[in-house]
Amino acid sequence: MLSRIRTVVVSLSVLAFLAVPAAVVSTPSPAFAAPQIDEALCQGANLQIDTALKAQCEDLKKGDGTATVNTLITQVINIISIVVAIVAVIMLIFGGFRYVTSGGASDKVKGAKDTILYALIGLVIVALAQTVVKFVVNKLTA
């Protein structure tokens, strides 16, 4: 029973990782439309814009596409982090269920505690990865 649940969770995780990048690239979203709107604003609307948009206008005038690439990288990392966080929370719940239903058997209790510990470690790694990615993207754009 446990191996069947593990197989289902791993299969869903793999499918999510394969489907998310395809969905990000194939469906236009407001985040991908933003550079087009920004470009239109930069080309002649007499509006007051803030400094962040002014910097994006400069990037668009250069034509190097770094703003778009950085946005895409950030979105993909955020989606992957969300999926991993959801899987970690599901594993926390699963570990808690295993702990409650262990019946005091030491091997089952140890397995449940390990599942909870590894899920918590996964959540910490996801949080640290977000911090590192944001730091690197900010340094690349600066």
Image (cartoon, rainbow, N blue to C red):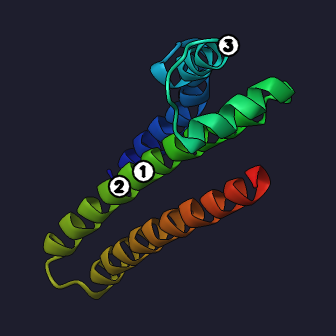
Residue at the image point whose x is 75% and y is 33% from the top: 58
From the viewer's perspective, tell me whether residue 1 is left or right of residue 123: left
Real-space Cα separation, disc 3 to disc 2, in angstroms? 60 Å
Q: Amino acid at mark 1?
A: Arg
Circle 2 is placed at which residue position?
Answer: 2
Residue count near mark 3 (Cα–Cα under 10 Å), binned few <14, some 14–19, many ≥20: few
Name the mark nearer the viewer: 3 or 2: 3
Real-space Cα separation, disc 2 to disc 1, in angstroms? 6 Å
Q: Is residue 66 above or below residue 84?
A: above
Pinpoint residue 103: horizontal percent, then vertical percent: 14, 78
Q: Is residue 92 visible?
A: yes
Q: Are marks 1 and 3 in contact (CB under 8 Å)?
A: no
Circle 3 is placed at which residue position?
Answer: 43
Q: Is residue 136 above or below residue 115?
A: above
Pinpoint residue 83: horizontal percent, then vertical percent: 45, 45
Q: Nearer the viewer, residue 77 or 17?
A: 77
From the viewer's perspective, tell me whether residue 11 is left or right of residue 111: right
Residue at the image point whose x is 49% and y is 37% from the top: 11
Indicate the quadrant where residue 101 lies: bottom left
Q: Amino acid at mark 2?
A: Leu
Which element carries disc 3, helix, strand or loop? loop
Residue at the image point whose x is 59% and y is 63% from the top: 129
For marks 3 and 2 on the same chain, the one whose residue lies earlier in the sequence? 2
Pinpoint residue 39: horizontal percent, then vertical percent: 65, 17
Return the mark for residue 19. none
Return the mark for residue 6. 1
Residue count near mark 2 (Cα–Cα under 10 Å), binned few <14, some 14–19, many ≥20: few
Which element carries disc 1, helix, strand or loop? helix
Q: Are marks 3 and 2 in contact (CB under 8 Å)?
A: no
Which element carries disc 2, helix, strand or loop? helix
